[in-house]
Image (tube, rainbow, N blue to C red):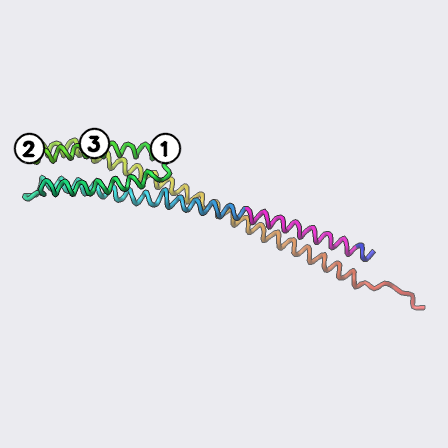
Amino acid sequence: MKWSFIGQQKLKAAGLLLSLMLVILFTATSLKHAVQDMDQTMASLYRDRLQPAVDLVHISESLHAKRLVLDNQFLTQSPLSGSVLVRYLRQHDQQIANRIGHYEKTKLTADEAIWLKSFKQNWAQGKQVEGLIQQLMATGKWAVARQLFSERGATLFKQSIQSVHELAQIQTKTGQSAVKEAHQLAAGGSLNVSLLTAISLLVGLVILGLIQNTSLRSLESPLFPLN
């Protein structure tokens, strides 16, 4: 009977240990997937949200710089020469083109694709207007050039900046969603760890109880007749 009891206790302990190992295996697999998903989310957050946001800042700076130098052409008594002005505008346009190239390589949402297309159209039309303004200034038609700059040029500039602002807003919203997703993944991993800890403690206590019962049963001495 004693050996049968001890065998039953060992089987119970082995069953509990097996259950614990299965839970550990399942939890470890879940944690591995959670960490991988979190890693992908954070990489996407940098690649598709933070870096494009920096590109938008530089695009906005280049647009304002172009606008400012053209405005100064009408205000200063010693405007830049035609060749210097062309070189300056081309440098900023090249910077914008490079930033757009970076942006287009990221994962775009449907709204991003729409606003980016709108920006590229306004920017292209703005460059055409800038070219006309330079031609008018080169032929001495400063009044006409200034009117074109103040009217059509100003409209295209505002539309381009509006497109940049809309893209920045999308970056903010999608970035917040990515951060929320990362928090959820982290919370899920923390829950799995807490569950595993609780189960481990419970199984450990049960096994200790089984061992103690087995030890007590083993210490029971059989009654032998004294005579």
Residue 153: quadrant of the picture? top left
Instruction: Give how far apart the Cα atoms at labels 3 and 2 are.
Output: 21 Å
The answer to whether residue 50 is magenta is no
Instruction: Give how far apart the Cα atoms at labels 1 and 2 are.
Output: 43 Å
Instruction: Give how far apart the Cα atoms at labels 3 and 1 are.
Output: 23 Å
**Which residue position holds label 1?**
110
Left or right of residue 79: residue 184 = right
Circle 1 — which element? helix
Measuring from the top left, give residue 107's x and y in whole percent: 37, 38
Left or right of residue 46: residue 188 = right
- Residue neighbourhood size for the residue with mark 2, other residues' Cα within 10 Å, grouped as few (<14), some (14–19), many (≥20): few
**Residue type (three-letter) at the residue carrying disc 1:** Ala
Residue toward you, 59 or 185: 59
Residue 62: quadrant of the picture? top left
Image point 9% across, 43% down: which residue?
Answer: 80
Q: From which residue to which does the magenta span run?
A: 5-29
Image point 37% across, 35% down: which residue?
Answer: 109
**Residue type (three-letter) at the residue carrying disc 3:** Gln
